Image: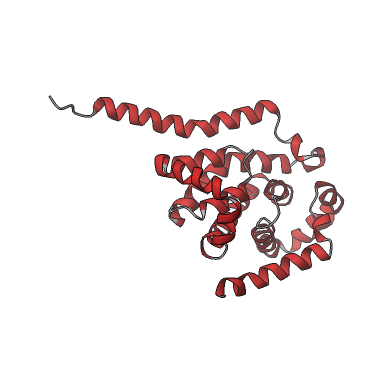
Amino acid sequence: MKRILLLLPLAALILAFLTLGLDQHLTLEAFHDSHEAIEAWMADHIWLGIAGYLVAFSLLTLFLPIAALMTLVAGALFGFWKGVLIASFTAALASTLAFWLSRFVLHDLVQRHFGERIAAVNAGVAGDGAFYLLSMRLVPVIPFFVINLVMGLTPMATRTFYGVTQAGMLAGTLIYVNAGTQIAEVDDLGDVLSPKLLGSLILLGVFPLLAKWGLRLIRGRLAPRDE
């Protein structure tokens, strides 16, 4: 019963958001149209703008797959270095919020919908620990909101989840924020990741697992053998 009560405000917010059609404004085209007006307002209300960005990112990405768009927006509004700093911490905090929501509130619902994935992720975490999460974060083709929900049902500590999440998403954050600084030239999210760049990120995602395998191999060879 307590879990249901906790969900009511979030459910009401989502229903109101969709009923009012506000989701139609969460597109690159809509942002292009209002970019100059938002930028002018931000010039006089920078701290309020940062706080609004953090709240919007944290809440909207709970039920909409728009993390990439929000990261582009950070580059457009705050510039490269500020955008990277703000988007990086905001994305990690938003992911941790979803992680907690899955672990403490939506446990049964997530279990029903992602049962098979949870079993696979549990096996991966048991075998590779934080390296497994890091590899998933480095590959941008895996929906982050799915990772957040599924990881909430693993025994991974919140501190580990947050740290690995922020480190693992940094490469993608740099790419999208940089693209956001040139927002006028970006007409589609697909324009940001070329096949070559996507392939490089996939290889980067595999690297942590290869590194751990290499460390195991080295340790095995250096370990003293019984005579």
Quarter that holds the C terminus? top left
Q: Residue at x 84, y 57 (%)?
A: 37
Q: In this view, does 220 lie to the left or right of 190?
A: left
Where does residue 165 sit, x and y in percent of width and height?
52, 48
Residue 193 seen in the figure: yes
Query: From what the image shows, is residue 52 above or below residue 72?
Result: below
Question: Could you say which quadrant of the image residue 213 lies in?
Answer: top left
Q: Residue at x 40, y 33 (%)?
A: 212
Query: From what the image shows, is residue 19 above or below residue 117?
Result: below
View extreme (right): residue = 33
Question: Could you say which quadrant of the image residue 197 lies in?
Answer: top right
Q: Nearer the viewer, residue 92 or 120?
A: 120
Q: Which residue is drawn at 50% across and 41% down?
A: 134
Question: Could you say which quadrant of the image residue 211 lies in?
Answer: top left
Q: In this view, does 101 lie to the left or right of 154?
A: right
Where does residue 12 sit, x and y in percent of width and height?
72, 70
Q: In this view, does 71 lie to the left or right of 28?
A: left
Q: In this view, does 215 lie to the left or right of 206?
A: left
Residue 93 seen in the figure: no
Q: Residue at x 69, y 60 (%)?
A: 56
Quarter that holds the N terminus? bottom right
Query: From what the image shows, is residue 72 above or below residue 4?
Result: above
